[in-house]
Image (tube, grey):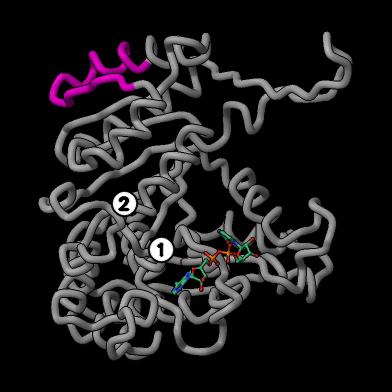
Amino acid sequence: MKYNIALLKGDGIGPEIVDSAVRVLEVIGKKFGHEFNFTAYDIGGIAIDKHGKPLPEETVSGCLASDSVLLGAVGGPKWDTLPGNIRPEKALLGIREAMGLFTNLRPAKLYSALKDDCPLRSDIVENGFDIMIVRELTGGIYFGERGMREGKYGEEAYDTECYSRMEIERIARVAFETAKKRRCKLISIDKANVLESSRLWRKVVHEIAEQYPEVECTDMLVDNAAMQLVRNPAQFDVIVTSNMFGDILSDEASQITGSIGMLPSASLGEGKRGLYEPIHGSAPDIAGKGLANPIATILSAGMMLLYSFGLTAEHDCIVNAVDKVLEAGYRTADIAHGENSLSTTEITDKIIENI
Ligand code: NAD
């Protein structure tokens, strides 16, 4: 098969880590008989420097014309003093909106080879954990009505949490489908004891659950979920939740894996095309030094193969290669703890050797 992939390398370590993922995809293409064509577009700080804006039209149209998009990261100190609407990070919201991406999938997995990186007590994580957070990405309080007004105590600001049945239904379906492909366990997280929007969320999730009898679906209040993630993370398989709760809980879940350079993500819409990126930023402190861990981006490319192209064996091949490299003790500096470490290119070579 032939696939056209748009590359948004961005800033800082973005170009280094995307180049690693491209090398891995090329080897996968050769092994499994696929042709991956790559076209690079500017985004973030580099786009501001070259085109005067963080998200040029050419980048948007290139992404919309592609089969899928792989993003590195954007931002850095050079652009930190610009006003909010032309900052590099603005491009992330813009490209998600332009591509109609309403689902964010963020796996948080503890690699057995990296158990010592987990900040939780060893008895809590002795069996590891492997969580998939399905976060609603384009609704809720981040997009609701907001403003300033005169209230009972003078000047006040407000933001509104609002969810439609349609928005809840479509994210719930993604979550149930995701759970079906994993351990068939879904926990829906809300604040239904207080919020009206959460009560609709819960009602609609229960309705959709009837169409998925093979998936065990339970509810959990968000405050309890925040505790349970650090008390017993292994109880979670798939989590589905709103935009803001997902934003906060997915950062908590990523932290308990102990390794920011390892975690991929996927943003998906109605069609097959998605936006795949590591969860970390552009790490300007280590850019250009060959120190960046490319594994999060390589695993993001793996998620693209699975979720956008339906290439399960090819995805599994990447995941297994990463597992083997870690089990063999190879590490980049961020997870080496002062032991011998490999550069970005060297660890990519090791992963390729294991494909
Ligand atoms: P960051 O994730 O870039 O870095 C945090 C720390 O983790 C740094 O010490 C960095 O060196 C390290 N780190 C991150 N990724 C790594 C990797 N792959 N390998 C090894 N070490 C890694 O977060 P930050 O420092 O808060 O932000 C830096 C810039 O990135 C800012 O401009 C911020 O706005 C931007 N940012 C972009 C995105 C994105 O593009 N999606 C996300 C978060 C932050």
Is residue 11 on the magenta stretch?
no
Q: Residue at x 84, y 56 (%)?
A: 83
Q: Position of residue 34 (x, y in %)?
A: 29, 72
For label 2, count other residues whose C-alpha is less than 10 Å away and answer few (under 14), some (14-19) or many (20+): many
Q: Position of residue 164 (x, y in %)?
A: 54, 17
- Give the magenta part as a residue range: 205-220
Which residue occupies the foreground of this view, 81 or 207? 81
Q: Is mark 1 within 8 Å of ligand 1?
A: yes
Residue type at the position of mark 1: Ile
Q: Residue at x 27, y 38 (%)?
A: 178
Quadrant, the N terminus: bottom left
In the picture provided, is 77 more to the left or to the right than 243? Answer: right
For label 1, count other residues whose C-alpha is less than 10 Å away and answer few (under 14), some (14-19) or many (20+): many
Which residue occupies the foreground of this view, 159 or 127? 127
Numbered label attached to residue 108 = 2
In the picture provided, is 41 more to the left or to the right than 171? Answer: right
Q: Residue at x 74, y 62 (%)?
A: 54
Residue type at the position of mark 2: Ala
Give the residue pinned by disc 1: 260
Quadrant, the C terminus: bottom left
